[in-house]
Image (cartoon, grey):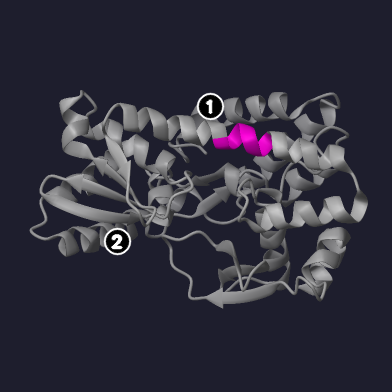
Amino acid sequence: VRKALEILDPNLADWWHRNSVNGLVRSRAAAFWQEGHYSLKEDGDRPVIVVDEDYTAGQTAQAIITEVAGGWFADSIGAHYKKYRLVRTGDYKEFRKWQLGAVKEAAKLASQLAEMYVNGIATLTPGGDLVVFTTDVMQRGLKLDQLVDLLPHLANLPIVSIIVTIGARRVRIPKEIAKRFEKITQHERLAILRKMGSATTDKEAATLLTREMKLVTKGRQIHHAISSIVHTALEKHKNLKGKYRLRDTRFEALAKEPVSHLGWEKWHRDLDKEVATWIFEHDDATVATFEAWLRSRYAKEDLVERFPTGF
């Protein structure tokens, strides 16, 4: 991991392995419903990255970079690194740019929570869980099919977990599973929530959720729009270099069914070449124009058939 970090980002590698920082890597058993990695700080300010047990050294190094690139909140390892860089370089403009981005992101998240509070459909527990009252939601006109679109969105908020009341059941939904909801179709989400609502106990509802998510996603691969070929092209672009990560998790799509995505098939290779060619031919493209084109490409019939929920 040290060697991979030094190749990918020497400055970050210097910080991670500095005696005063001493970043720690841990592994855990992989599970389909959880993200491949997460980060935290412990023992004061020591950064820790926790990755699935099948992560390679290179993937682990990339996970560290991903976590540091985000880090909008004060207790994140990203904020720790950015403060370190300010002390080392004295580049207050770089730090100020990050601060402004953090404030903007925090305001966006706060406004979403505030809107839910004002409408009386959610509250926070002292432990940091978000409780969504679906009975109240439905009385105010928000139907169950709208709730299933809300769950993945809630998973991006700075909260511990989401507690949802479905019928007579009260179920704690881990953020990892809430994020997975975003990748399955609305019809599949509705079917799962309705089964949970018919459970006789809260524990049974939680078990149903985990079991049904496994059944629904079994054999369906995750597709990465930012593949190796696409990422190489991006890194050679004057405006897009450094803006995307290899297999960037922001641009993942779940295959409609197992046969929709089986590794690097010919259609996949052709698509990678098409995207890379577009990047090379549009040397003045910005992040906004590239992503707008990429989303429009994935909205075409051939890809919607494979990835109906897009990314």
Choose mark 1 or mark 2, whichever is in front.
Answer: 2
Instruction: Identify the residue shown where x is 38% and y is 44%.
Output: 184
- Depth check: give the residue in front, 291 or 162: 162
Are the residues tagged 1 and 2 within 8 Å (C-beta)?
A: no
Residue under label 1, please give it.
300
Instruction: Identify the residue shown where x is 49% and y is 47%.
Output: 158
- Depth check: give the residue in front, 223 or 301: 223
Q: Earlier in the sequence, mark 1 or mark 2?
A: 2
Residue under label 2, please give it.
210
Circle 1 Cα neighbour tier, 10 Å, few/some/many (<14 / 14–19 / ≥20)? few
User: Which picture quadrant has residue 101?
Assistant: top right
In the rendered image, the vertical position of residue 152 relative to residue 228, given as above or below:
above
Disc 1 from disc 2: Cα separation: 32 Å
Expressed as whole percent of the image width and height from the top left, the position of residue 16 reads 77, 68
- Depth check: give the residue in front, 178 or 230: 178
Q: Is residue 16 left or right of residue 117?
A: right
Residue farthest along the right direction in this orientation:
89
Circle 2 Cα neighbour tier, 10 Å, few/some/many (<14 / 14–19 / ≥20)? some
Expressed as whole percent of the image width and height from the top left, the position of residue 188 reads 29, 44
Instruction: Identify the residue shown where x is 49% and y is 28%.
Output: 301
User: Which picture quadrant has residue 139?
Assistant: top left
Give the overall secondary structure of the magenta segment: helix
Instruction: Identify the residue shown where x is 41% and y is 42%.
Output: 154
Q: Quadrant of the N terminus?
A: bottom right
In the rendered image, the vertical position of residue 307 relative to residue 12, given as above or below:
above
Tell me if residue 164 is in the magenta stretch. Answer: no
Q: Amino acid at mark 1?
A: Lys
Tell me if residue 102 is in the magenta stretch. Answer: yes
Expressed as whole percent of the image width and height from the top left, the position of residue 276 reads 76, 38
Magenta stretch in the rendered image? 101-106
